[in-house]
């Protein structure tokens, strides 16, 4: 996997998306239980209660500090990181496509970043279901019991609810579509924004005469928010150049939907004129 730049923002995003409490938080909790058992066995109340109170207070403070610091200002830092990544991936897209900028000066290229799609976590048009309270408690207990296990993290689809309908996702898709004299050329990249690793990238080339339709619209996604433990609704905008072979070019964006909508008329006009020329 190709690694992108690493900086302090990535560290913040790793903490927010792949939350793993520091080991000492778990040891504080075990110490609290251990001292309670010893005090019961040896009937030592005063000192044990004092130590238990200190450990319990330290555990509560550590939990609260870690929880609130993990999400403080993460939404703004997330989108700042997306913008920086887009600049890096824009240059990479041009190199991977093997083009020079003079070749696609007909209209401005389309540059879009959005949520990477995955059927296991994104449900379009499905009913939002409530999660069993017992299941939530069981998963919490299991996590506490196995706090010492630190498996190697791999990139995952993790959605976080930052409040006020602001949803962020750990996996991002970046799309760069350029329009040459003969065809539309796209670079597609899926990457983990927290780790800064590109998971998949490829290019697609579609001749103007093969494009059957230019579609643009909005979709309401139902996504599972890990931090809130419930379903959230989020709207994305998408643009698609459809062809009969299903080898379509598509771009989606979360956040400022006007970016795509402003370019749609230019794309439609270009493809119409090119299809007429090549007819």
Image (spheres, rainbow, N blue to C red):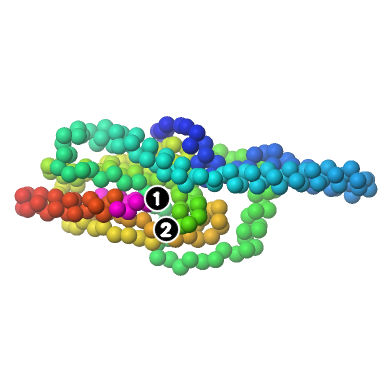
Q: Which residues are magenta?
A: 249-258
Of the residues tagged 1 and 2, which is closer to the observer?
2
Residue 221: mark in rendering: none
Residue ID at (35%, 60%): 219
Residue under label 2, please give it: 234
Q: Position of residue 141 (x, y in %)?
A: 68, 53
Give the quadrant of the N terminus.
Answer: top left
| Quadrant housing residue 192 | top left
Q: Is residue 206 left or right of residue 219?
A: left
Residue 210 in view (yes/no): no
Say if 210 sits above or below 109 in the image. Answer: below
Residue 207 in view (yes/no): yes
As rendered, which of 270 and 123 lies closer to the eye?
270
Residue 115: mark in rendering: 1
Q: Position of residue 61 (x, y in %)?
A: 69, 45
Q: Is residue 254 magenta?
A: yes
Q: Secondary structure at mark 2?
A: strand
Residue ID at (91%, 46%): 46
Q: Is residue 17 magenta?
A: no
Q: Are marks 1 and 2 in contact (CB under 8 Å)?
A: yes
Q: Position of residue 210 (x, y in %)?
A: 15, 52
């Amino acid at each position: 996997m190709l690694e992108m730049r690493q900086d302090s923002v990535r560290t913040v995003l790793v903490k927010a998306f792949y939350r793993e409490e520091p080991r000492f938080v778990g040891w504080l909790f075990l110490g609290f239980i251990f001292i309670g058992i010893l005090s019961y066995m040896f009937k030592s109340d005063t000192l044990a209660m004092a130590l238990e109170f200190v450990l319990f207070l330290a555990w509560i403070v550590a939990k609260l500090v870690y929880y609130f610091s993990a999400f403080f200002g993460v939404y703004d830092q997330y989108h700042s990181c997306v913008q920086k990544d887009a600049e890096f991936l824009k240059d990479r897209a041009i190199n991977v496509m093997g083009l020079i900028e003079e070749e696609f000066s007909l209209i401005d290229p389309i540059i879009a970043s959005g949520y990477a799609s995955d059927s296991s976590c994104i449900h379009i048009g499905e009913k939002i279901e409530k999660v069993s309270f017992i299941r939530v408690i069981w998963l919490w207990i299991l996590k506490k019991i196995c706090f010492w296990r630190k498996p190697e993290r791999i990139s995952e689809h993790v959605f976080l609810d930052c409040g006020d309908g602001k949803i962020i996702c750990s996996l991002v898709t970046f799309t760069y579509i350029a329009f040459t004299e003969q065809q539309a050329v796209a670079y597609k990249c899926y990457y983990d924004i927290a780790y800064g690793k590109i998971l998949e990238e490829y290019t697609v080339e579609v001749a103007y005469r093969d494009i059957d339709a230019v579609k643009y619209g909005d979709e309401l996604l139902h996504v599972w928010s890990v931090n809130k433990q419930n379903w959230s609704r989020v709207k994305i905008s998408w643009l698609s150049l459809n062809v009969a072979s299903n080898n379509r070019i598509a771009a989606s964006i979360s956040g400022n939907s006007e970016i795509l909508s402003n370019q749609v008329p230019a794309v439609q006009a270009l493809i119409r004129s090119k299809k007429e020329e090549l007819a």
